[in-house]
Amino acid sequence: MPLLDVQGVHSGYGGMEVLHGVSVTLEPGELVTVIGPNGAGKSTLLKTIFGLLSPGQGRVTLAGAEVTGLPPHRIVRLGMCYVPQVDNVFPSLTVQENLEMGAFILRGGIEDRLSRVYQLFPALKSRRRQRVGKMSGGERQMVAMGRALMLDPKVLLLDEPTAALAPNLVEQVFQSILAIRESGVAILMVEQNARQSLAISNRGYVLVDGRNRHQGTGVELLADEEIGRLFLGG
Amino acid sequence: MWERLPQLFVYGLVSGSVITLGAIGLSLTYSILRFSNFAHGDLMTSGAYLGLAFLALFSPLLPGRFGPLSFGPALIPALACAMAANAALAIGVDRLVFKRLRRAKAVLLLMASVGVAFVLRNLILFSAGPDPLYFSHRIQRALRIGGVRVKADQLFILGTALLFVLLLHLLLRYTKTGKAMRAMADNPELAQVTGIDTERVVAWTWGVGASLAALGGILSGIENKLVTPELGWQTLLPLFAAVVLGGIGSPYGAMVGGMAIGLAEEVSTAFISTAYKPAVAFGLLVLMLLLRPQGLFGRR
């Protein structure tokens, strides 16, 4: 049984349907990337899984429990956290305060969790009293992922974690994502940097016009001629 | 006219204290609920009347006066009870009115708050009557400190305001609830996605804002000896001027803005008629919106 199972999900905004029956699975410890052209519904898929949008049809289960249409604050408690693509930090709060907010629903000490996040992102530890609003895009992305890891989730959803980052930072963020997977968290990520993200992923899905087009291991998808031509820039 | 300035400065600090306590709540509701609450002035009025009611209740139990002050030990429990009751009132109003409009446009919430303001004021008018009610009839001797006359009550008002501003600072900076309030002011969607109990934060926001409003209303009653049902409505303009001056949505800005408006209003009376006090606040409001719409401490 997959850890996260998305079956035939239809979803969208208001009256406009964006996803026309998308299915995705995620096994424990896996890193899975969803790629596809703009408007394919990648972000919509993550928002639907996380309960920010409720699907018209289809089911989402997390570790066997149905979470379809549950609001985000309930889903967070079931062990799935989400990092939005933009506005994913609290700019006027310090690094440490951002992380503390990630653990808001917990009562009691969070020292262990803080030190684990600082272990994953050592760069943040020395800057923990700094306001996040004054930090660079790459550092913000680390704060955002660190915040989502404070609850020690089983599943982490990442919406284009490298969007709008300088190339050297993209590499750094992918390294962090690999480190998160090593720590045992399963990751479902949506990406524009298709080539780099597939290279580090166990499996990938290609989404086109709100439907599954291809799927396979990262290596298979990278080697596929049609995918190479359409999505990986030749 | 210049020799009056130190004296007016003292009056300015006192009226600035009252404005600050009101402006903080207005700023908090703006930053967390994203609308201008026109009923906030009337929450000061309700707080002042609740203060009078509790004062009447506690005075027979705790008679007497503190030295040169116009009030006695009964004021302490009366303040605490009035602040708590006003907080409960605001949270109740939120449940009844604003909660249903959580996803509505800001202008709708604003109109609803104007409605709440009318209802609150008229409820007070209906239950307490239109005539002023007196906090104290006693004439106070002013102390002389270096050529400036200061009443003991005024020192109490300034000290109390500073104490509660400090408490608010500690709340916002060091408690989980305070940090969540700042997080929600930053980004309400992310706060929700993070699992922050946003409704609890909203309740705290109303509670803190309304209890400080009650404190401001009562302190204004002590300074002026009396309250009328129009207290809050008349204070609303300086409140908004203070919030805009400090930067909309910044509680720290509201503290500085409140003091600045109080000082400007009082000091202006050295040069122009007292009747123009509201015009001074309004002038500063317009000037700030033209020159630096984000305010002194505002972002963007």
Image (cartoon, coloured by chain):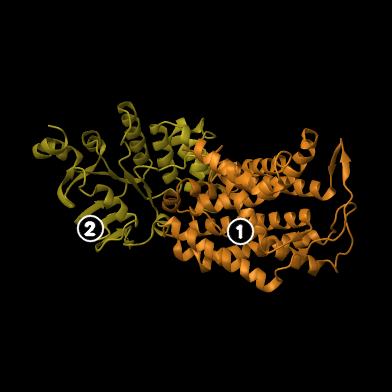
Chain colours: A yellow, B orange
Identify the residue at horizontal 62%, vertical 42% (top origin).
B257
Q: What is the C-alpha distance between the residues marked 1 and 2? A: 40 Å
Q: Which residue is mark 1?
A: B207
Residue type beneath disc 1: Gly
Q: Which residue is mark 2?
A: A16
Q: Residue furthest bottom?
A: B126
Q: Residue furthest front?
A: B273
User: Going by the image, does A62 lie left or right of A37?
Assistant: right
Judging depth in this view, the residue of B33 and B247 nearest the camera is: B247
Point out residue A59 in the picture as x, y percentages from the top left corner. Answer: 26, 62
Judging depth in this view, the residue of B234 and B257 nearest the camera is: B234
Judging depth in this view, the residue of A140 and B88 nearest the camera is: B88
Residue B151 seen anywhere in this rendered image of the structure: yes
Q: Residue furthest left?
A: A225
* Chain containing the residue with disc 2: A
Q: Compared to B226, does A161 lie above or below? A: above
Element assignment for label 2:
strand
Q: Residues within 10 Å of mark 2 (few under 14, many from 20)?
A: few
Identify the residue at horizontal 71%, vertical 65% (top origin).
B49
